[in-house]
Image (tube, rainbow, N blue to C red):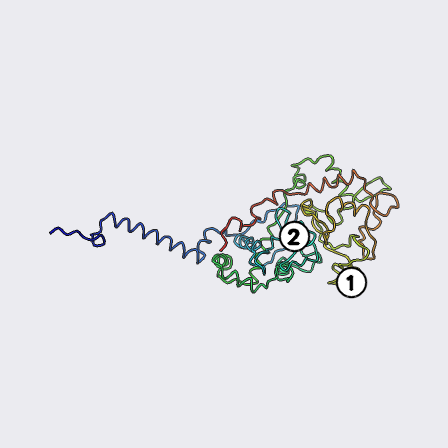
């Protein structure tokens, strides 16, 4: 009797064995990948590791500010960059450090004052995050002595990102990706408040701007225009009308290769200050209205200007120093009695001189810095889970 076997009873052929093994192999491969991803093994291959090369011109100097027990590594910087742009670190899951520090604006936000998670405006303008590797005091009043201390404030302030670091650590611990990356950086998957601020600080130390036309000029690789040269000369000179020397008197605060001196000054914005500046910390009347001198690097991109963002343009800033310095008991000595006119009380720059100063300030724009993919938001291209 010729009996046909049911399909499931037929003897398996070599061809069917091969097909089965292929299917099984695919399933096994997917399982291994799934396990690897959940364990963070995937990031062992993708995350760069080793010392991070902090490259900068020799004229920037080697007096850098890095913790002795926290060397800058590629893996820490990688993680810090992710957390710098991580919205889970805010109470409404919408804000990150990058919200107030946009790369295209040299890590400012283009606003006089910034709104936090509760839509309450900040009390001071968002400062540019550039060449922080050399800084020793942070914020307009210098209240933080390290980038680690600085990072804590906006994340935990109820009117900024508004979330405790403990809760931020808990939220990150529940993700698929972060525990594995923390393990690559620290050797285990523990996510702590301390580790969060340390890696963010690591990333911020890499924000080095040293490729402007001014840098090219210092390397003898760029010839400034006549207008830029005039502005550079004015920038670097102190006015001496008795000798026929005109100047803008800028280098007391913004001299040197980095165009930044770590000083705190009352620059004559007001006679009576609503914001007392560092006097709030020191209690000294001589400190009233004194604020940190900001870097001029990428200054053309970081409007509005001053601690309260009162000036919208560089023209307004130069007009202030030229004609509108306001007297007070704590006014910086550098701004008292400086003039291009004998016995004058203000600089009195000419229209052409103001134009040339702005031409020079535009030489400080570093287009490579504000487009460098190493500093960009990684979450725009990486799947966040």
Asked whether, in this view, residue 285 is left or right of residue 136, the answer is right
Q: As displayed, is residue 76 above or below residue 360?
A: below
Q: Position of residue 234 (x, y in %)?
A: 77, 41
Q: Position of residue 97 (x, y in %)?
A: 60, 55
Crowding around mark 1 (Cα neighbors within 10 Å: few <14, some 14 to 19, many 20+) is: few
Q: As displayed, is residue 218 above or below residue 280?
A: above
Viewer-side residue, 11 vs 375 = 11
- Of pointers 1 and 2, the one earlier in the residue sequence: 2
Between the residue at mark 1 and the residue at mark 2, the CA separation in whole angstroms equals 27 Å
Report which quarter residue 224 is drawn in. Answer: top right
The residue carrying mark 2 is: 134
Crowding around mark 2 (Cα neighbors within 10 Å: few <14, some 14 to 19, many 20+) is: some
Q: As displayed, is residue 90 above or below residue 26?
A: below
Q: As displayed, is residue 143 above or below residue 259?
A: below
Front: mark 1 or 2: 1
For the point 63% across and 52% down, the residue is 101
Asked whether, in this view, residue 195 is left or right of residue 7, the answer is right
Badge 2 marks a residue whose secondary structure is: helix
- The answer to whether the residues at label 1 and label 2 have Cβ atoms under 8 Å apart is no
Q: Position of residue 359 (x, y in %)?
A: 72, 39
Viewer-side residue, 377 vs 11 = 11
Which residue extends farthest left?
Answer: 1
For the point 56% across and 53% down, the residue is 81
Q: Where is residue 74 in the image (x, y as percent from the top left)?
A: 53, 52
The residue carrying mark 1 is: 284
């Amino acid at each position: 009797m010729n009996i046909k076997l049911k399909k499931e009873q037929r003897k398996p052929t070599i061809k069917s064995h091969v097909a089965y093994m292929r299917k099984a192999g695919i399933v096994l491969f997917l399982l291994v990948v799934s396990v690897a991803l959940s364990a963070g093994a995937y990031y062992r291959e993708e995350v760069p590791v080793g010392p991070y090369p902090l490259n900068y011109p020799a004229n920037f100097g080697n007096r850098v500010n890095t913790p002795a027990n926290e060397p800058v590594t590629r893996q820490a910087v990688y993680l810090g960059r992710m957390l710098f742009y991580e919205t889970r670190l805010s109470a409404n899951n919408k804000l990150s450090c990058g919200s107030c520090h946009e790369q295209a604006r040299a890590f400012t936000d283009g606003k006089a004052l910034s709104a936090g998670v509760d839509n309450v405006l900040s009390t001071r303008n968002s400062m540019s995050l550039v060449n922080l590797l050399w800084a020793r005091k942070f914020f307009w009043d210098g209240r933080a002595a390290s980038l680690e201390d600085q990072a804590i404030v906006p994340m935990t302030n109820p009117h900024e990102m508004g979330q405790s670091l403990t809760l931020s650590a808990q939220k990150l611990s529940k993700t698929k990706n972060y525990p594995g990356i923390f393990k690559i950086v620290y050797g285990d998957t523990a996510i702590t408040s301390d580790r969060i601020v340390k890696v963010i600080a690591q990333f911020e130390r890499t924000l080095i701007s040293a490729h402007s036309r001014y840098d090219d000029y210092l390397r003898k690789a760029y010839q400034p225009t006549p207008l830029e040269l005039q502005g550079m000369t004015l920038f670097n000179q102190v006015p001496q009308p008795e000798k026929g020397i005109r100047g803008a008197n800028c280098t007391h605060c913004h001299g040197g290769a980095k165009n930044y001196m770590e000083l705190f000054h009352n620059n004559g914005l007001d006679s009576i200050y609503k914001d007392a500046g560092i006097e709030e910390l020191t209690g000294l009347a001589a400190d009233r209205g004194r604020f940190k001198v900001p870097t001029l690097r990428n200054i053309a991109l970081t409007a509005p200007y001053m601690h309260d963002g009162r000036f919208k343009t560089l023209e307004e800033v130069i007009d202030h120093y030229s004609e509108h310095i306001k007297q007070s008991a704590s006014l910086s000595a550098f701004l008292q009695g400086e003039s291009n006119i004998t016995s004058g009380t203000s600089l009195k720059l000419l229209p052409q001189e103001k134009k040339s100063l702005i031409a020079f300030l535009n030489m400080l724009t570093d287009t490579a810095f504000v487009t460098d993919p190493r500093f960009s938001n990684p979450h725009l291209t990486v799947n966040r889970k």
